[in-house]
């Protein structure tokens, strides 16, 4: 008996490279992730990752330029959610360096997003075209109930190398 091919669903969003679109981007990705019925913890993790990744693309990659866009693509492939975030600032960087300093950094907030993304997602890859674009490719595999990381398993612990007291209050 032949297996049927995995059906792919592709969803795309393009926004100007400003931080004001962060909620729109998170809502877009979360609405797609809900189709895979991730656990509440996994949904929180996906939202956190998208927050970090989009903020990095808009702020660092494109310098929050209204002249540039950030493209977000979500692909559902079987039990996998693939999230691709591409900015057009074209500024290469070394993600491994930022991941390493995240453990040693003792100043203020920020600088830990890449480490958080790599700890949460099952696959993470960066692709650079100097002077043109940076693409972040991430995969989150939906866990079957009872599998490690599923809701019936103990909650995963992500050790953050900073205190929540270090986070400044949100201006009102």
Image: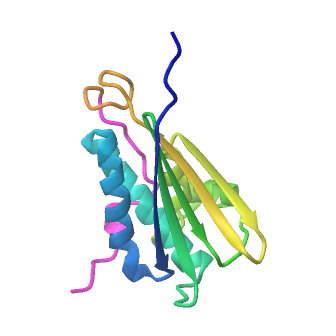
Residue at 60% across, 58% down: 136
Bounds of the magenta segment: 154-172
- Please state the horizontal and vertical placement of residue 115, each as a whole percent of the image: 54, 53
Residue 113, compared with residue 71, is above or below; it is: above
Residue 5, compared with residue 20, is above or below; it is: above
Q: Magenta segment, principal secondary structure?
A: loop
Q: Per the image, is 158 magenta?
A: yes
* Closer to the camera in the image, 159 or 170: 170
- Please state the horizontal and vertical placement of residue 3, each as a whole percent of the image: 51, 19
- Please state the horizontal and vertical placement of residue 26, each as a whole percent of the image: 36, 64
In the displayed orientation, state which residue is furthest to the top: 1
Residue 153 seen = yes
Residue at 45% across, 70% down: 109
- Please state the horizontal and vertical placement of residue 143, each as a whole percent of the image: 38, 30
Residue at 43% across, 80% down: 19
Q: Per the image, is 38 magenta?
A: no
Residue 138, compared with residue 168, is above or below; it is: above
* Closer to the camera in the image, 95 or 7: 7
- Left or right of residue 71, residue 109 in this image: left
Residue at 54% across, 66% down: 111
């Amino acid at each position: 008996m032949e297996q049927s091919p995995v059906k792919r669903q592709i969803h795309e969003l393009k926004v100007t490279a400003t931080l004001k679109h962060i909620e729109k981007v998170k809502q877009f990705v979360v609405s797609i992730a809900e189709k895979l019925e991730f656990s509440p913890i996994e949904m929180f993790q996906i939202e956190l990752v998208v927050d970090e990744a989009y903020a990095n693309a808009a702020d660092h990659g494109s310098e929050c330029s209204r002249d540039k866009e950030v493209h977000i693509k979500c692909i559902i492939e079987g039990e996998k959610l693939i999230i691709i975030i591409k900015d057009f600032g074209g500024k290469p960087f070394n993600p491994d360096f930022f991941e390493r300093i995240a453990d040693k950094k003792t100043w203020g907030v920020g600088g830990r997003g890449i480490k958080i993304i790599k700890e949460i997602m099952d696959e993470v890859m960066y692709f650079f075209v100097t002077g043109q674009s940076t693409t972040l490719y991430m995969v989150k595999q939906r866990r079957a109930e009872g599998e490690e990381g599923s809701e019936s398993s103990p909650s995963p612990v992500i050790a953050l190398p900073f205190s929540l007291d270090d986070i400044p209050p949100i201006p009102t």
